[in-house]
Amino acid sequence: MKKSRHRKIKELVEQFEIETQEELADMLRESGYAVTQATVSRDIRELKLSKVPMGDGRQKYTILIHSDHYLSDKYIRVLRDGFVSMDMAQNILVIKTVAGMAMAVAAAVDAMKLKEIVGSIAGDDTIMVAVRTVEDTKCVMDTIRGVLEE
């Protein structure tokens, strides 16, 4: 039952902008799961859900990677150590890194499995990330800032 509920939580978080535990609990109940606030809180902790900014001042739950191996400390460390800056050109996100670190930082960004990202290309110190829309680019930037500031 727990695995099924965890799968459903992942599905809901990917599909909807869920801001609160209550919202998540309500959606689970609507899907046929009998949950309490304590159960949802424990599930959030076990799934290592994070809240990320949506760009309009609100935050939503997200899974930083969609497998059984969540965004590991290694990826977070690589992102923090290699990241220099980022800027956007419409729906292209350009990330500057320390020389020689672009591929490692790109791997960390790819590991985030953000649905807004179509793909990325890394050189020596620059990564070009193709993002679906201009608005999505702002959200991706906010998400990366959130990881960097954790």
Image (cartoon, grey):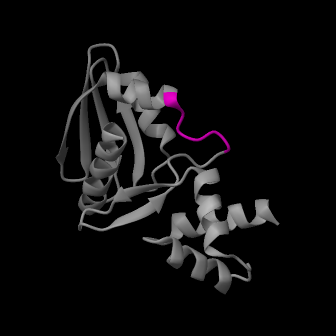
The residue nearer to you, when weighing 67 against 123, is 67
Q: Residue at left 65%, top 77%? A: 28
Kindly give the residue lying farthest to the top in the view shown.
Answer: 100
Q: Is residue 118 left or right of residue 91?
A: right
Q: Residue at left 59%, top 80%? A: 27
Image quadrant of residue 129?
Answer: top left
Kindly give the residue lying farthest to the right in the view shown.
Answer: 1
x and y, in percent, of residue 4 in the image:
77, 65
Q: Is residue 38 left or right of residue 79?
A: right
In this rendering, the answer to whether 90 lies above or below 72 is: below
x and y, in percent, of residue 74 in the image:
50, 25
Kindly give the residue lying farthest to the front in the view shown.
Answer: 38
Quadrant the N terminus occupies? bottom right
Does 75 appear in magenta? no
In this rendering, the answer to whether 98 lies above or below 133 is: above
x and y, in percent, of residue 17 in the image:
43, 71
x and y, in percent, of residue 30 in the image:
65, 86
Total marks placed: 0
The residue nearer to you, when weighing 40 against 87, is 40
Q: Residue at left 27%, top 14%? A: 99
Instruction: State whether the magenta stretch is mostly helix, strand or loop.
Output: loop
The residue nearer to you, when weighing 13 against 113, is 13
Q: Which residues are magenta?
A: 68-73
